[in-house]
Amino acid sequence: MGSIIIFGSVNVDLVSRVTRIARPGETVLSASYDIYFGGKGANQAVAAARAARAAGGFVAMAGAIGQDAFGNDCAANFTAAGVDVSALQRTTERTGVAFISVDDTAENAITVASGANLRISAEAVPEALVLSASTAIFQMEVPLVETLAFAQRLPDDATVVFNFAPADESADPAVLTAMLDRTDIFVVNEHEAEVAGRLAGGADGLAELARRFGVQLVVTLGAAGVDLYSPDGARQHFEAPKVAVVDTTGAGDLFTGTLATRVDEGMSLSEAVAAAAHAASIACTRPGAQVDVFAEA
């Protein structure tokens, strides 16, 4: 396999278990909370590194953290997971934090304080690391203009995997369209696909979105599985393994990181989607956003 680089967010997750998600104006008590490493970019980087472990792949994280204890812990966590940190940027802003509530049905509600993630710089990533990338992964928890700037620095033959999550209704349509023009594999859920299609010129439906931008469109459907739309609009469906769900936090990120890694290793996209869906299903049976589902492999 080649070299995978993730450009995106780094957070610490503060997770509480509740009987139900609080409604507006309501306080819901939790007995305690847990601290996990998170951030969509970080989750995808750790998943990619663990998925690539058997093949000895190289995975690097280009993100921004604070000069604080959480930042130090995040950097150490990357190193322990086998993620290269030479492109990890230190800023004067605090490391990002996500506040997560998980209810008795394993649904979650998440508030993210972005902090250092908003200070990430595409230009600060070393040129040699950018030019060595065979695959790059992006999400929506850092400024989209920086995401596009980084994508445009990549080699022409690098595979771009863009996860439009969380969907941003305020995204600049011109910047989003330019990013989609550089994207090879576009990973979304149904809501994210609808928002992206509307912002990027009003694409009518999933097949039209795939055709308009010439992307492989991967639509995650939770327990209902995954749909894959090719650039000609053809659809292929993949069932998700049935599991006893404990926590869905980070499962989508593990899906994206695994998908990108398997494609980088040379799997067909269909094989990679199936492998990623299997890994994400296992992740839902365990708590936390950075579950190592490849430890037994």
Image (spheres, rainbow, N blue to C red):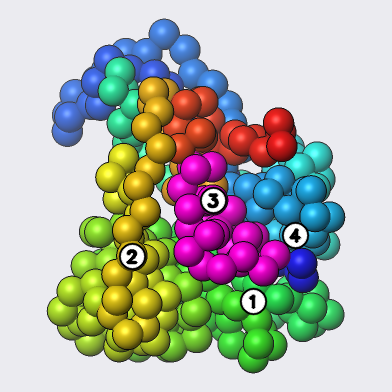
Quadrant of the drawing holding the C terminus: top right
Q: Which residues are magenta?
A: 256-280
Distance from the alpha carbon under mark 3 to that under mark 4: 19 Å
Q: Nearer the viewer, mark 4 or mark 1?
A: 4
Dot 2: what SS?
Answer: strand
Please name the residue that numbered disc 3 is placed on. 275
Q: Nearer the viewer, residue 287 or 99?
A: 287
How far apart are the two marked residues, 1 and 3, measured between alpha carbons? 31 Å
Where is mark 1, residue-wise? 122
Calculate the distance from the C-alpha at mark 3 to the C-alpha at mark 2: 15 Å
Q: Decide: few, some or many residues near mark 4? Use Cα within 10 Å; few <14, some 14-19, many ≥20.
A: many
Residue at which label 2 appears: 236
- Image height check: is 202 above or below 46? below
Q: Toward the viewer: 93 or 86?
A: 86
Q: Amino acid at mark 1?
A: Ala
Name the mark nearer the viewer: 1 or 3. 3
Q: Residues within 10 Å of mark 2 (few under 14, many from 20)?
A: few
**Residue 84 location, x and y as percent?**
80, 57
Q: Which residue is mark 4?
A: 59
What residue sits 54% from the left and 51% below the top?
275
